[in-house]
Amino acid sequence: MPFNAQDEQLLNERGMSVNSVLQQIHQFVHDTQPARLDRPCTVGDGILALSATECNTYKQIFEQAAQNISIQKFVPSSGAASRMFKHLYNYDPNNVSELTEEFIIRFDQFPFKSLVEMRMQAAGLHLDELRSRNEWSAIFDFILGSHGLNYDDQLKGLVVFHSRDSKLYTAFDEHLHESVAYGKQGDGRCRIHFTLAPQHFERVSAYFEERLKQFEHNQFELSFSSQNPSTDTLALTKDNEPFRDKNGALVFRPSGHGALIHNLQQLDADIVFIKNIDNVTVQSALADTVFYKQILGGVLYDLRSKIFDLLDRLETEDAALEEALEFIQAWFQPGLTVGMTRQQMLQYAQLRLDRPLRVCGMVRNEGEPGGGPFWVKMQGGYISKQIVEKSQVDIADPQQAKILSASTHFNPVDLVCSIKSRSGENYHLDEFIDYTAGFVTEKFQQGSVLKALEWPGLWNGAMALWNTVFVEVPVSTFNPVKTVNDLLRPGHQG
């Protein structure tokens, strides 16, 4: 695969080398493969359903631990708002989709309606007049265009999601409110890390600087990062050659949210909560979300403490080995290879315990998009709990398709993580990625088809070799906004 001097210079500027790119291409072209599902994780078989007593116990564990540990929230936030409003583009009054019809009929319930009205008045327009004449094209153009709300070129986090007490709140605002409720450290700080595209840093920083003045709790510690250009992947032709633009330059593409594992690696916290930017709710409906976040945090902290204790004891107590093996089989990895010596079992226990830990909330499957919890056959021949997306499964295989359809739960991206070892140092998270879980998709650019390479998803293959626990949580904790019409759901109406 030929690379010229111009290519090498471009690679160097991106923090890459010819060898690293060749290795990257080989991984995607030759090593990626579908997940091999063994069976769905269900309650009692991979998913933990807690009793009321257990919930309260874990809540207390978290509340006590939060006084003495560092906590941070990690929010992938680079998503564009334009996808939310896709059904409003190219509006045709003679051919109105169901989503657009619902948007029009229930327009008064959208929280940004008052903002539209105010901005229109400033521009010499009158919303009620346009509505009376059924001129929705003009209204949609004002919502989307740069002369209005500019939601066609806006971050999803800056879209108005809620309205209460005559005040408007964006998704960014609601993450701040939510963090105060469960993410406050003993020193009073709420630490939140947002991932953004570099061109949005200044705008978002300025927004927060102004908004934080309105919060009673003002001990927020906000930080930002972007995907490193070195995690971008080289686009390929259908023949697996480098794809080049009209000037002959190599074409690179962002490699998906799996690249954010490197951003997560840089955090300094004992417990990290991970949640998508659009999964927020109104304050009047926040109680369940807070309660179960504390429970997930309690489960994680309790397991983390027991793991650290076992690792300490395995170094000095011979009797701790049996306890460690039972703990591993009960929580993480069923079964044990036959024929291992005691020394090999000790090494296995230490290796199995000494790795990043995540506790994932799982919601009963009600048709929402998202990865599901499955027992997966890994390359080493063992089975492991994994979050698997439909795109990772070979649905042409009838048996795999049957297992996929039998899933009872899905992952609402509700994770609590421990990324530090006993020594207090961060694990090298790239050592726990299953690179075979990458994606190869086809895109159309410059009149040609190219192959786009995406790293394993952040909560899929990028965390595949972590210790994983699935806990059932109620659907009331999951309030995503994939289209703007989702703001009409109870979790957003208050």
Image (spheres, rainbow, N blue to C red):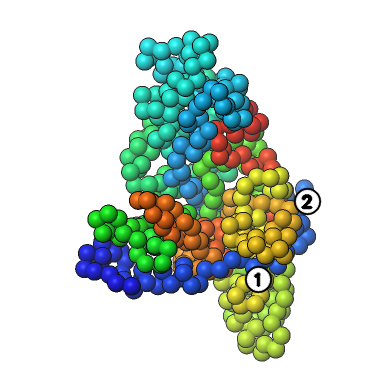
Q: Amino acid at mark 1?
A: Lys
Q: Does 483 sit left or right of 452 as displayed?
A: right
Q: Is residue 275 above or below residue 465?
A: above
Q: Which mark is residue 205?
A: none
Question: What residue is pinned by disc 2?
Answer: 51
Q: Which mark is residue 377?
A: 1
Q: Which tag is nearer the camera, tag 1 or tag 2?
A: 1
Please name the residue shown 66% across and 75% down the image.
382
The location of residue 90, given as percent across then percent down, is 47, 30
Q: CA distance from mark 1 to mark 2?
A: 30 Å
Residues 245 and 456: in front is: 245
| Mark 2 Cα shell of 10 Å, populated few (<14), some (14-19), many (≥20) | few
Quarter of the figure that contains the N terminus: bottom left
Please name the residue shown 32% across and 66% down the image.
16
Q: Is residue 484 above or below residue 11?
A: above
* Image quadrant in which you'd find residue 39: bottom right
Q: Does 16 sit left or right of 223 as displayed?
A: left
